[in-house]
């Protein structure tokens, strides 16, 4: 009988089976090549109405008259769908999406489940693509883990993937009890806003829950490049083709999108002056690094390369590990300080040495109106574009 849904064919198969059984005959499935069986092969690939169950059209009209016309036909196919928008159990070229079983859901990536959630809300594929285009690749990687944990939580609790405040509270509390840091909890909160709207992320009880997490498990300080103050993400985007040399030092332009990139906002340019003390001169160290790596670059133009063959460009996490290892070799306690702490240190020291806030913000990649430095980086411990670097190196 195979997978046919035709009542007539099922009944015929039973008759044949009983006929053979009464005569002591056995039926075997055997392969027949296409050339000998091309008519049956062609017919088997056709999607005909008689091989799919469907709701009686007259009854569907009565349902619409009584309850209104539905927008989406769930679990249908192009052969029996009653709405222009439908979701298929299996692969279907005209289906908006298809449901994921528990096993396939566990294997799927978080963004696929997010796309499915949006599609079930009635959003078109083009709209969903545009929404995802608003997020950088690095943010998508960061969100991926949070999305997967949320959908695993939904599967475990047998919940719909839509959300209410009580479920959001339960999810965040569970993640905190499993060891998530306050920063991770806030990241989950941001992710929920992308899927379910700002009203969830800014709900009073959710904000208080995140505040409680930060008090019970205070965030550890993090770090970046000392003489530029920029983020590690920015360092990973440096391309040697965008490095220019002058008599005074090196200028590095960053055309790729970074965290603070926005329409109409200038992209960063890092200025590394040639410092009088060559032992701590970042610009000369950079020139030396490019000379040493020239032979292994082949066609790779990204500044920082992996030690291992084939020497590909490294990601921000690798650079962070390098900085942390250097801090450790310098005698810094890396249990307390991490790779991003250099960002705190350099900006705070520059402020203490009299560098103006405008120069600090510009050099560190903050916007003109940003309050980030005042809130998180101005720790106790210049109009000239090289003022920041010189102040740090002189210290």
Image (cartoon, rainbow, N blue to C red):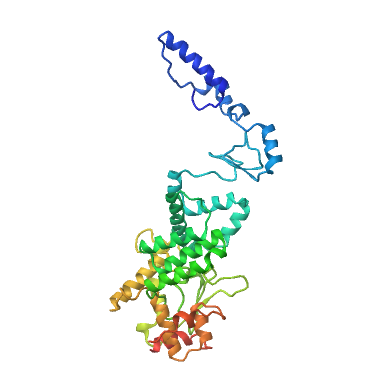
**For residue 42, above or below residue 374:** above
Residue at far right of view: 65
Query: In this orientation, which residue lies closer to the viewer: 270 or 112?
Result: 112
Residue shown at the point (60%, 45%) measured from the top left: 96
Where residue 127 appears, as percent x and y from the top left, is: 62, 55
Query: In this orientation, which residue lies closer to the viewer: 10 or 227?
Result: 10
Quadrant into which the C terminus falls: bottom left
Query: In this orientation, which residue lies closer to the viewer: 362 or 368?
Result: 368
Locate residue 50 relative to residue 151 in the image: left or right. right
**For residue 265, above or below residue 309:** below
Residue shown at the point (54%, 72%) measured from the top left: 260
Residue shown at the point (49%, 63%) measured from the top left: 139
Whether residue 93 is visible to the viewer of this picture, yes or no, is yes
Residue 103: quarter of image: top left
Whether residue 299 is visible to the viewer of this picture, yes or no, is no
Where residue 300 appears, as percent x and y from the top left, is: 45, 62
Residue at far top of view: 23
Where residue 227 appears, as percent x and y from the top left, is: 43, 81
Residue 291: quarter of image: bottom left
Where residue 369 appears, as percent x and y from the top left, is: 57, 80
Residue at far bottom of view: 354
**For residue 205, above or below residue 154:** below
């Amino acid at each position: 009988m195979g997978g046919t849904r035709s009542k007539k064919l099922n009944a015929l198969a039973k008759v044949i089976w009983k006929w053979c059984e009464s005569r002591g005959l056995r039926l075997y499935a055997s392969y027949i090549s296409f050339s000998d069986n091309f008519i049956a092969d062609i017919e088997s690939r056709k999607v005909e109405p008689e091989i799919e169950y469907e709701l009686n059209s007259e009854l569907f009209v009565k349902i619409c008259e009584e309850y209104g016309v539905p927008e989406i036909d769930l679990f249908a196919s192009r052969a029996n769908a009653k709405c222009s928008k439908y979701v298929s159990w299996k692969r279907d070229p005209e289906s908006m999406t298809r449901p994921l079983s528990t096993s396939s859901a566990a294997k799927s990536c978080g963004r696929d489940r997010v796309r499915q959630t949006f599609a079930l809300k009635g959003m078109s594929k083009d709209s969903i693509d545009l929404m995802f285009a608003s997020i950088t690749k690095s943010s998508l990687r960061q969100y991926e883990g949070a999305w997967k944990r949320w959908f695993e939580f939904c599967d475990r609790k047998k919940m719909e993937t839509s959300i209410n405040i009580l479920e959001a509270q339960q999810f965040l509390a569970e993640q905190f009890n499993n060891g998530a840091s306050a920063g991770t909890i806030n990241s989950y909160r941001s992710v929920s806003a992308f899927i379910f709207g700002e009203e969830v992320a800014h709900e009073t009880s959710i904000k208080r829950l995140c505040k409680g997490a930060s008090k019970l498990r205070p965030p550890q300080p993090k770090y970046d490049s000392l003489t530029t103050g920029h983020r590690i993400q920015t360092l990973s985007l440096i391309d040697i083709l965008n490095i220019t040399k002058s008599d005074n030092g090196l200028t590095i332009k960053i055309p790729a999108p970074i965290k603070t990139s926005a329409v109409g906002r200038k992209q960063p340019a890092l200025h590394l002056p040639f410092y009088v003390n060559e032992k701590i001169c970042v610009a000369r160290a950079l020139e030396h690094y490019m000379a040493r790596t020239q032979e292994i670059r082949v066609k790779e133009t990204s500044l920082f390369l992996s030690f291992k063959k084939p020497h590909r460009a490294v990601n921000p996490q690798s650079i962070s590990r390098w900085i942390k290892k250097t801090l450790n070799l310098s005698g810094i306690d890396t249990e307390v300080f991490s790779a991003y702490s250099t960002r705190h240190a350099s900006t705070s020291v520059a402020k203490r040495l009299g560098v103006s806030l405008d120069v600090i913000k510009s050099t560190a990649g903050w916007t003109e109106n940003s309050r980030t430095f005042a809130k998180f980086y101005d720790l106790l411990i210049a109009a000239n574009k090289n003022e920041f670097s010189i102040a740090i190196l002189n210290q």
